[in-house]
Image: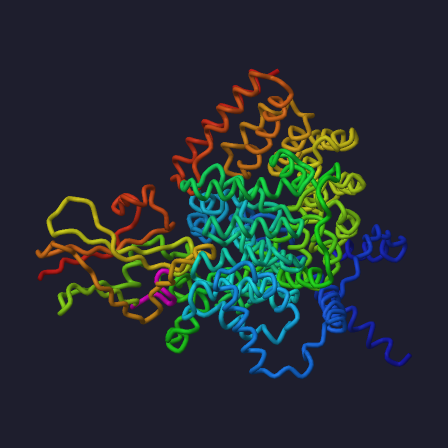
Amino acid sequence: MKGAPAIFGVLLLGLAGWFLVSVFRPQGQDPATNRTFVSSQQCAECHPEAFEEWNGSQHSISWTNPRVRALSNDFANQDCIDCHAPRPVFVTGIGERVLPRVSRRTEGVDCLSCHQMPDGSMAGTIHDPRAACRPTQALDLTRPEFCAGCHNQHKTVDQWRASEWPARGQDCLACHMPYRNGDPNQGRDHSFVGGTSLAFLQRAVELRGGREQDGWVVEVENVGAGHAYPTDERSRASDLFWRAKGSEGPWQFFYRIRDPYRTETDIPRTLVDAHETRRIPLDTGEEEGPIEVALFYMRSPFYEDPEAPDPDREATLVRSIVLEP
Amino acid sequence: MRSPFALGGILVLCACSPTPEPPAPPPAPEHGPVVATAIERLERELEASAPNKDEGNLDAEEVAEQVRGLIEILASGDRSIAEVALEEIALVGLPALPILRSCAESDQESDGRRAAALELLGALPHPDAADVLLHTIETDPLPWVRTHAAWRLGHRPQPWIVPRLLLRLKYEKNYETVVWIADTLARCHNYSGLGVLFTILNSASDPADQEQARARLQAILAELDFEDAGEAWQAWLTNDPEERLPEPLDSPRLRLEIWRWVQRLGEFQLRGVDDGRYLFESMGPHAARILGQALSDEDVYVRVHAAQSLQRIGPRAAVAGPDLVAALADPDLAANAALAIGSIQYEAGEAALLHGLTGGDPDLRLACARGLGYFGDKASAQATGGLRALLEEELSDELRQAVEESLVRLGQGDDLVEGLSRWLTSNQVESASSRRAFEVWLRGRADGGSEDAAQLLEEWLALELPPNTILTPEERAVLEEKRSEFILRAARALP
């Protein structure tokens, strides 16, 4: 029993310490009540900036986007559901395929998809058990494998791995989730900018051309995409058109850059891989004068009238050049 | 809690009060290597029963010469001695395979010799010969070669070829090949190809394709106890309640093929998963039995997608009902299992869904609410009562929408139809499900003899967009507004 007074002393000291902290702690530093997070809407209360960025992103409309709904036949094509309304990545596992949610599908790829941990707490850049969402620091969030569960379904992450970008230290986040204003202290931008941005597309490819011995040759070079241009089978395409310089007439199609969808067994894969330069011969028939060549980007591969495509209206003009004989 | 006295109070309470026992969770189902074990067992079984590939002391050169002679006979076009050649190839057996494969797959051979080799392969009663024909259907660039292989494969149908043929039915683009794939499937008593034949008959631009489809439909019907192809198709789709269709052919090798596809549900790439779901749906009860067992596999991807596949098969998967009810205790699977129980209309599972409606898991509540709506005319009064009672509670928009839709689907929510219109213009919930629920209701009224409903149904269907029509968000909003107004009008016009 010799140790009893010592133990009592320690307990008393601990109790006194707890008493002092309880009584004199400033009001503003109350630990938040741990909450159960069932919707990304709850995240907006403390993270309005990130929430608003996400809310304007493609991730937030992955379920409701009319384009997605059309291509998936209103998600009758079930294999789209998994990535367009995924359960949290930390639950299914980094680098593993995600599994589909049953509820809240309209929230798409939401905050919880990326940040929610199996115990309901959140993965983030800091560790703070006193915050309502109990964030823990999780560097896994920044790894390409984190994105791969969905984005490697169409081989995008594999395309990046096969490129020189990993050796140059450029990963998914470097382009698609940069620091706000380039300042790490401001955190990462949650807009997930990508192929919907013209500036982004223009950083990805260059267009050149010239007259060679056998006729016109047009070159498309993937200079800036960390993966193939375009990436994402089925949904994306990039088309080359030409017309006589100064003509207001319709564009004439001559080349499609695309990875065919699984049923399109008779279409070759023509994606321009990272760092690749594709040389494409162009036959302009009897047109011998200067021509205009244009590279358009499509977020779905279908024109309203395949026989008479109207890329000016139906696609995004990425680059155009004038070629003189 | 600022005061140490509060802590003291709590400590005293903890010491004095008995700790309340939380309700015992339902027992978690035991998971194990179900798929791997089944595959291993079947592989062993097949290996033990495989014929000896060493066919005696035949000289390879002699065999090659003999087979080349048989190919020449058939390629000559003289059908009077063709039967002899076909009998002889069966006697030569497997040693003939390399020569036949080489001839059938070579684009250096004449068309006549390639066709002869395919015919001889079709006469060899061995899985390896069927495998060569399937490979030809899957890979040959020439449509006539693929067509010929599909036709010859039907001469000695082997049950195990069904999954691979079904996959070709999904991907093949040449109509003539599709017609013969459908024919060979029918010879295996799988009638999934009937639907494709109807499509070709009704929409092919080439009259020759239409005629091929018509002729094959008639030939298939001649083998069945049906005069009307549409009736046969309906019987296939509805699990043949009058048992007029022959039982699908079965074999251990076919079961092995199905298990291997179930295993693919665990793959990273969703492509294989989607193919699997399509195959299982096209196989119906045959696959459902195996999928039910797979719900206990250790791989969560296999379990979830097996449940999804059962949901997609619908009432023809009723055999998996007990497995699905057991799966409700699996937290990773419960919601998918609830949806599937409703979709297969497993009446003994209704009580479990009603119980899930009142639980604390929001995913499961939602799935149970939706699942009950899929029961159709098999839903009990308790089901509609349970759903009605839920409407009295404070619910999330998503759950309230699901409950309303289910009651409308069950024909017990006439008073709720008008309200469905609001979900079409909400950004917080899925509008497509409300559209579908409304359509079920309207179709039910039209089928019940209401001419007004039939007229409205026609107008409603006219609002459908052609496939792959991509609207801008603004255009989509306008369309949903229009549909929403239509629902209001229809609900008021059809009291």
* Total number of numbered discs in the rendering: 0
A229 part of magenta stretch: yes
Residue drawn at x 54%, y 65% is B135
- Residues A188 and A267: in front is A267
Classify the position of the C terminus of chain B by image quarter.
top right
Task: Point out residue B396 in the picture as x, y percentages from the top left corner.
Answer: 63, 38
* Residue B77: x %, y % from top left: 49, 60
Please name the colour scheme applied to the rendered image. rainbow
**In this rendering, position of residue B24 left or right of residue A68:** right
**On the picture, is B21 further left or further right than A167?**
right
Residue furthest to the front: B80
Q: In percent of the image, x 51 and y 60: which residue is there?
A: B78
The image shows residue A108 at horizontal and vertical percentages of 52, 49
Q: Is residue B165 magenta?
A: no
Q: A43 or A80: nearer the eye?
A: A80
Could you tell me what secondary structure mostly forms the magenta stretch? loop
Q: Is residue A322 visible?
A: yes
Residue at 74 percent across and 37 percent down: it is: B241
**Span of residues in magenta:** A223-230
Residue A125 appears in the picture as rendered: no
Q: Position of residue B479 (x, y in %)?
A: 43, 31
Which residue is nearer to you in this view: B364 or A234? A234
- The residue at 13%/55% (across/down) is A291
